[in-house]
Image (cartoon, helix red, strand yellow):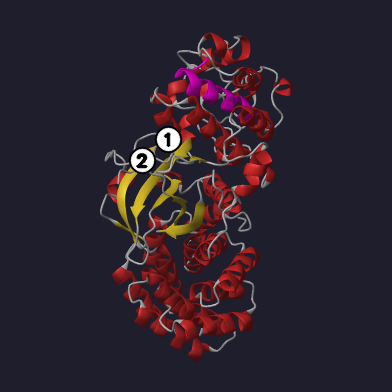
Amino acid sequence: MKAYNILSLFGVKMKAGSQRYDSPELVKWRPGDKFGDHEVKSVSFGGMGIVLFIGPPVSSNIAWAAKSFRDEFMQEESVIVSFWNEAQYWLELGRYRNIVYADHVFEIEGKPYIYLEYMDGGSLRKLINDRSTSIDKILDAAIQICCGMEYAWQNGKLIHRDLKPENILLNSRGEAKITDWGLSKVMDSIKIAPPAAFKNLKASLYKTRGGVALGTPPYMPPEQFEDARNTDRTADIYSFGIMLFEMLTGRLPFRAYDAEEFYYRHKNTKPPLLSSICKGLPEIVSACVQKSLEKDPKKRFASFEEIGDQLLKVRSDYSGAKRLKDLINDGTVVMSSRELTQHGFGLLHLRRDKEAIEYFNKAIQADPSNWEAYGYKSYCLGNIKLHEEAISSALQSLRINPRFAHAWANLGYSYSEMNQHEKALAAYEKAIRLNPQDVTHYNNICISLINAGQFDKAIQYAKKGLDIKPGYWRLWLNLSSALLKTNRHDESIDSAKHAISINPRCKGAYLILYEIYKKNGMTREASDCLKKASRIDSKYTT
């Protein structure tokens, strides 16, 4: 099965499988590497983003595309916060027929990845390049795009701002699905120079007010060049008009050499009449394109539902629908118990525990034997300090599957929070016996032992975990904390610096260093560490 590139949130443009090993991140992730429970099959890379095509684990037949930002942006708080927001917007769309499904978010080595359904049919570009594609097939794809866009608006008021053929993916059944949702929500807060390809563009063009290059010039309406952040949904309608023109003719309505010239064409040049290029094209279709490409946003269609209704007049036999709203309503896919669990899991990682619990409850209602849902629900209940309920949910998970290590770990956490340290340690040790390679269990028991005042034992477990995974910064942090409690300052400093070398935004490590340096009269060093902690979290003022 050939992997096809799913563009990243930040403009990945290389086909999956193409490798650029000059990037440190691509040296880190290569085909065959273990990625969580999956195996890396191929990597795409470009701009600010990275996409890994990952094969299914032993326990599943599902393949994913995992997307994130590149490692060098790990220190950019705006990138990290915006990525989590992007994941949230995408997850909230749920499962819909014409939107690439975002299943969950998961941290791998301290960095979040959003797991997306794998699309194996290429992009809309493939359809455009195949000039034997029938008008009916083109219109069917256009109607599906309208369904996806209208659904996203009705269920989240989402504006895409980067509609283009590469962001419309196809599956093996030929269904069109929209990817890269909410690009502007991520990019708005990232202050970087425009891409080199658009270096000739005037400073006032092709940027948000925050100074960020945003969008793809051949598909952008004129107002998006001028103020990308404040465009409305009619900007997407203009981009759709460009795509539909290209789908029908195989060419763009405007040709230019750089972004500035594209801006001029979009603002001042009338698009060619489709009737002069595509002989025999229904007038309704030609009129749809012309109205979508109006220079004045107020003269365009007000919604994708309006466009879809017009196109359905030509494709009246498409699913037997006469109105787009009928197709929109039919496009929602009922989520399985597994999908509801994974959706809750994604919300869990977004720290939206109460909403995650709602999804876990739905998953349990759909399948009362879903031990994972009970186990993860326990985690969320513990986070919101409902420890008795958390213990009950974890025990229910373990009654169904006594070998679910995460449920034992969640049980240990709630016992620890209720000062039942012996029970907590027993639960954590059970989790380790069941899954001795999962370093999060060593980290959990280390924290519990520190809270119980058993510092030497905490140090032992931290070192065992680091033998398994030396790059796990949280264990270095907690090892540093335990060493500090035993006044082993030099070792504590070394461990804190290890944590920072792996995660430069580890404020806890800076605070440990601050405390040690202050105790030892190293005023300048202590002040420097406090300043670094305050840059990460402003509540630590200098």
Image x and y of residue 321, in percent: 63, 39
* Quadrant in the rendering for residue 416: bottom right
Secondary-structure class at tag 2: loop
Q: Would you say residue 33 sits in the magenta stretch?
A: no
Q: Amino acid at mark 1?
A: Ser
Label 2 packing within 10 angstroms: few (<14), some (14-19), many (20+): many
Residue for point 37% across, 69% down: 490
Q: Amino acid at mark 2?
A: Tyr
Confirm or deny contact between disc 1 and disc 2 (CB under 8 A): yes
Residue for point 43% across, 66% down: 474
According to the picture, the residue beneath numbered tag 1 turns out to be: 123
Q: Which residues are magenta?
A: 235-253
Q: Earlier in the sequence, mark 1 or mark 2?
A: 2
Alpha carbon distance from label 1 to label 2? 8 Å
Viewer-closest of 81 and 46: 46
Viewer-closest of 213 and 296: 296
For residue 406, say whether it is visible: yes
Is residue 518 placed above or below 44 in the rendered structure? Answer: below
Image x and y of residue 388, in percent: 62, 84
Secondary-structure class at tag 1: loop
Residue for point 53% across, 72% down: 373
Residue for point 58% across, 24% down: 241
On screen, residue 443 versus residue 315, left or right, reads left
Label 1 packing within 10 angstroms: few (<14), some (14-19), many (20+): many
Res. 4 mark: 2
Viewer-closest of 98 and 340: 98
For residue 230, say whether it is visible: no
Viewer-closest of 262 and 327: 327
